[in-house]
Image (spheres, rainbow, N blue to C red):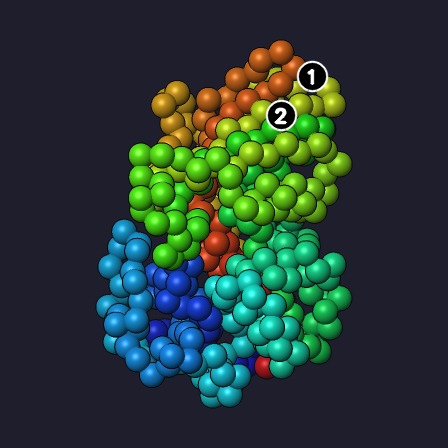
């Protein structure tokens, strides 16, 4: 393990930074890290106009939980490399907009920081892993192609809808997936804040989300190393949190419902960090589930993917899934990736 200085007050945790801390994903980082047993959010960074101001005064808090008490009056820092170094930060969680991330994240990498990013800016670079531990934990080794351990690196999350799909499909890859038909029904929190005007989505649905379908096609193939045809359709629906997806799969052979269910039930993980679910996929027997309202449930909360309505029609296997787009699909996924990194590599001093 590293000789990096830890923060004594929160119990010898590793100091980390959250970039874009006032945005929706930044809020989830703050919520999750406030009580995390390994990482301590020593720096909450925002735009220059927010620097020096109290977090509670500058954030439009949207989560169904209060702002953690210790962070309500925390001063927001400017995004400054010297501030990160002064706070003994090595691990940086990025919730930056893609255009800002494209400029900032390579600079941080070049300065030796370990960047775990939610942005899509560098996600498709050849040497940047799109990392989901349940699906492709060995992809973490791509950081060596960026110069680690002599240099910093960027490791990216998948798109939030891709994440839930990849977790559920990972144990099914040995069955020979050849076709994926997926329709996503995505919550408004996936659009960020302020996101969609309320009157544009209230009592309605928007049958197009720019760039989402292309992301699913590219990312699911890269993450799972699949040579499969992918047919996505993405819809925005008026629920606050959680993405519902309906899926039909075609296989090389004649897959059975019982085989798919057994693959999920037997899919276990070693909990190398507090954000890791032992059972990544939880099947629900009631035909009325899963629903987006469950997305903050599970163990750990928000990190499991729920499935249901497993059935076979003709030669296709169908089911539904729900993923927490802000936890597993965003901030919690990045924290999980950082836990995997610390477990595998430790920290360089």
Residue 218 image offset from top left, x and y in percent: 67, 45
Q: Nearer the viewer, mark 1 or mark 2?
A: 2
Query: Foreground: 29 or 239?
Result: 239
Res. 167 in view? no
Q: Are marks 1 and 2 in contact (CB under 8 Å)?
A: no
Residue holding disc 2 = 249
Residue 169 visible here: yes
* Residue at the image position 42 percent from the left and 59 percent from the top: 25
The disc at residue 97 is none
Image quadrant where one finds the C terminus: bottom right
Q: Distance between the residues labelled 1 and 2?
A: 11 Å
Residue 176 vs 206, above or below: the answer is above
**Badge 2: residue crowd in 10 Å (few <14, some 14–19, many ≥20):** many
The structure residue drawn at horizontal position 73% and vertical position 73%, both measured from the top left corner, is 147
- Residue 109 screen position, x and y as percent: 63, 75
Q: Element under label 2? A: strand
Residue 313 located left or right of residue 84: right
The residue beneath circle 1 is: 254
Of the residues under marks 1 and 2, which one precedes in the sequence? 2
Query: Relative to 266, is 276 above or below?
Result: below
Taking depth in this image into account, of 159 and 307 the one nearest to the observer is 159
Question: Residue 194 at x, y = what percent?
Answer: 36, 57
Image quadrant where residue 264 sits: top right
| Crowding near the residue tagged with mark 1, few <14, some 14–19, many ≥20 C-alpha atoms within 10 Å | few
> Does residue 288 lie above or below 197 as drawn?
above
The percent coordinates of residue 27 (x first, y second) are 36, 62
Left or right of 122 on screen, residue 97: left
The residue located at (35%, 49%) in the rendering is 197
The image quadrant of residue 2 is bottom right
Check disc 1 and report its element: helix, strand or loop.
loop
Specify the quadrant that holds the N terminus: bottom right
51 vs 158: above or below: below
């Amino acid at each position: 393990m590293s000789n990096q200085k830890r923060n004594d007050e929160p119990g010898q945790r590793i100091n980390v930074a959250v970039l874009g801390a006032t945005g929706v994903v930044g809020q989830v980082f703050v919520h999750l890290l406030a009580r995390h047993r390994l990482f301590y959010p020593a720096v909450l960074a925002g735009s220059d106009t927010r620097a020096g101001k109290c977090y509670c005064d500058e954030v439009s808090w949207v989560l169904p939980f209060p702002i953690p008490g210790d962070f309500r009056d925390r001063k927001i820092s400017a995004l400054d490399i010297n501030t990160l170094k002064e706070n003994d930060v090595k691990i940086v969680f990025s919730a930056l907009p893609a255009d800002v991330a494209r400029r900032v994240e390579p600079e941080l990498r070049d300065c030796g920081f370990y960047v775990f990013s939610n942005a899509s800016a560098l996600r498709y670079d050849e040497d940047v892993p799109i990392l989901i531990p349940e699906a492709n934990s060995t992809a973490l080794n791509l950081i060596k192609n960026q110069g680690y351990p002599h240099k910093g690196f960027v490791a990216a999350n998948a798109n939030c809808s891709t994440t839930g799909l990849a977790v559920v499909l990972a144990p099914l890859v040995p069955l020979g997936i050849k076709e994926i038909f997926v329709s996503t029904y995505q919550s408004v929190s996936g659009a960020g804040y302020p996101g969609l005007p309320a009157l544009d989505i209230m009592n309605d649905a928007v049958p197009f989300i720019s760039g989402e379908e292309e992301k699913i096609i590219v990312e699911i193939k890269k993450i799972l190393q699949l040579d499969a045809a992918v047919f996505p359709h993405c819809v925005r629906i008026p629920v606050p949190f959680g993405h519902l997806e309906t899926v039909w799969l075609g296989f090389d052979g004649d897959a059975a419902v019982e085989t798919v269910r057994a693959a999920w039930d037997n899919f276990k993980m070693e909990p190398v960090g507090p954000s890791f679910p032992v059972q990544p996929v939880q099947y629900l027997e009631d035909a009325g589930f899963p629903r987006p309202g469950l997305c903050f449930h599970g163990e750990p909360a928000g990190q499991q993917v729920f499935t249901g309505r497993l059935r076979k029609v003709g030669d296709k296997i169908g089911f539904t899934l729900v993923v927490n787009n802000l936890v597993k699909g965003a901030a919690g996924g990045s924290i999980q990736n950082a836990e995997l990194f610390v477990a595998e590599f430790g920290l360089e001093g």
